[in-house]
């Protein structure tokens, strides 16, 4: 977002994604790579009232796909990969007439729902993950896209006695964005985002226990977890690079709701 925080080494102006491993397998990883001239990430702007409530959304799951992808918080450089539950790769069910996810699903970087702090709104501790984002409207994005969004609202879920915040967001460039925005409502929910950002900042500077989460990074120079570009490249290259596009199989079980 636009809020101040740990000092970045350089502006994250440009980036591209790099795939390693076979899709729909535990070895698949999607890394982010800084480049001199590639696809553009939204530029960070000086903090002011106009941009106070704009945030960068990292897209983990495009709509109409079934694989449950998420940021791997326990791995170095936090790539996007498919979740594993009980040794199996989970897939979201198809509920007719929809297929898989019905929105662009993602996360708000540099936020952390602290599992050691009780949320005042839910009376439950955080789920040890970044804040989730559900981007409404119809444009289909891709794994690893980063877009500027604003949030008309936020929803708190309780999953296995853990708080799981869902930010309802819309792309600021959407032609209908102005119809989904009420600045008073956005400011009312701002403390939730700010508190999870502060938890993440404390963890980045090693002022609290981050548990098993890995925050190795190349951007925040004053973080004890900072690594060089060369070290980051070695971490990425340690993941097998081969891609087998011929094995893109998902569970295609359909469910129908009765009247």
Image (spheres, helix red, strand yellow):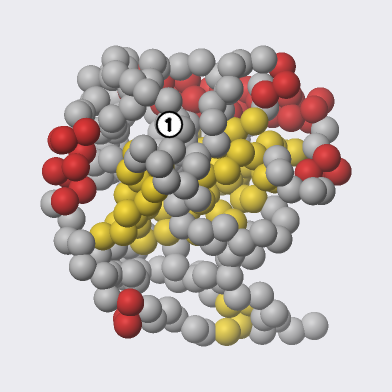
- The one nearer the camera, 172 or 114, is 172
Q: Quadrant of the C terminus?
A: bottom right
Residue located at (15% from left, 35% from top): 231
Q: Is residue 119 visible?
A: no
Residue on which disc 1 sits: 12
- The one nearer the camera, 141 or 104, is 141
- The one nearer the camera, 22 or 120, is 22
- Counting from the top left corner in percent of width and height, residue 58 is at 50, 45
Residue located at (26% from left, 70% from top): 243
Instruction: Say above or below: 259 vs 101.
Output: below
- Counting from the top left corner in percent of width and height, residue 2 is at 58, 23
Q: Quadrant of the N terminus?
A: top right
Q: Residue placed farthest to the front in the image? A: 37
Instruction: Say above or below: 257 vs 57.
Output: below
Instruction: Tell whether 224 sits left or right of 40.
Output: left
- Counting from the top left corner in percent of width and height, residue 204 is at 33, 23
Instruction: Using a 10 Å C-alpha cutoff, classify the residue at mark 1 as few (fewer than 14 neighbours), some (14 to 19) or many (20 or more).
Output: some
Secondary structure type for disc 1: loop
Residue located at (24% from left, 41% from top): 76
Instruction: Tell whether 49 sits left or right of 28.
Output: right
- Counting from the top left corner in percent of width and height, residue 197 is at 49, 25
Instruction: Say above or below: 31 vs 193.
Output: below
The quadrant where residue 166 appears? top right
């Amino acid at each position: 977002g636009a809020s101040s925080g740990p000092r970045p080494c350089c502006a994250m102006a440009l980036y591209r994604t790099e795939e390693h491993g076979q899709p729909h397998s535990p070895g698949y990883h999607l890394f982010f790579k800084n480049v001199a001239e590639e696809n553009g990430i939204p530029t960070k702007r000086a903090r002011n009232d106009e941009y106070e409530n704009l945030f960068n959304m990292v897209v983990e799951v495009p709509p109409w796909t079934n694989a449950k992808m998420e940021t791997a918080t326990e791995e170095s450089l936090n790539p996007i990969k498919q979740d594993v539950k009980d040794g199996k790769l989970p897939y979201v069910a198809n509920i007719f007439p929809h297929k898989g996810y019905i929105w662009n699903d993602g996360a708000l970087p540099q936020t952390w729902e602290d599992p050691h702090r009780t949320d005042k709104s839910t009376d439950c501790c955080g789920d040890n993950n970044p804040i989730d984002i559900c981007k409404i409207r119809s444009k289909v994005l891709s794994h690893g896209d980063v877009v500027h969004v604003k949030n008309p609202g936020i929803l708190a879920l309780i999953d296995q006695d853990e708080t799981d915040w869902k930010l309802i967001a819309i792309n600021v460039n959407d032609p209908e964005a102005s119809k989904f925005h009420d600045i008073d409502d956005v400011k009312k929910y701002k403390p939730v985002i700010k508190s999870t950002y502060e938890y993440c900042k404390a963890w980045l500077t090693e002022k609290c226990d981050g548990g098993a989460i890995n925050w190795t990074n190349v951007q925040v120079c004053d973080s004890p977890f900072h690594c060089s570009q060369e070290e980051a490249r070695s971490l990425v290259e340690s993941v097998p690079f081969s891609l087998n596009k011929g094995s893109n199989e998902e569970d295609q079980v359909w469910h129908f709701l009765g009247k």
